[in-house]
Image (tube, rainbow, N blue to C red):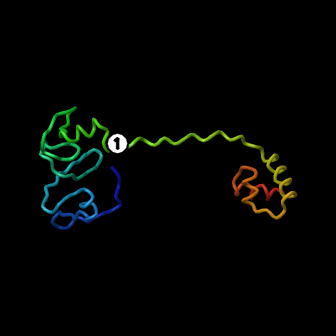
Amino acid sequence: MKSTGMTRPLDTLGRIVIPIEIRNTMGIEIGEPLEFFMDVEQGFMGLGKYSNGTSCKLCNSTQDLSYFKSSLLCKHCILDLKGNVGVTPIPVTPKEEHKVRRSTLQLLKSLRKLMREHPGAKQSEYAEWLGVSQGRISQITKLL
């Protein structure tokens, strides 16, 4: 659950307007029954589409239901789950190779040498040649 950042005032009759963006996203039609959820200890109140308890937990279908681990699922959703339909793998970010860190003194010496060999080069070029950021080159040049 995430915060939408939207707020609505409660009118004098205790009503609120559910923003159209939320109604469209949640597929809530005008006149459709909604259900209130609350946690008094946490001070939380939520709304959801009303389900009379006899619909699929995933798609709200009322056809071909089966009971699985305290939830009702329809035949279509069960087949989708078995066939991994709509399942996306969790992206794994490759670990960065451990870079050997050089001391400031070593970088300073290398930069001086490059500046003598290539006096007209840009900081970005020095950074690329030394394998450091342009900001690091800027820091080192201040020490020259």
In which image quadrant can residue 71 be found?
top left
| 10 to the left or right of 126 | left
In which image quadrant can residue 62 be found?
top left
Is 137 in front, or is 85?
85
Identify the residue under disc 1: 87
**Residue under the point 12% across and 61% down:** 31
**Residue under the point 41% across and 41% down:** 89
Q: Position of residue 132 (x, y in %)?
A: 71, 51
Q: Position of residue 16 (x, y in %)?
A: 21, 63
Give the amino acid at mark 1: Val
Is 24 in front, or is 66?
66
| 83 to the left or right of 132 | left
| Number of marks in the rendered image | 1
Mark 1 surroundings within 10 Å by alpha-carbon count, few (fewer than 14), some (14 through 19), many (20 or more):
few
**Residue under the point 17% across and 60% down:** 29
| 136 to the left or right of 61 | right
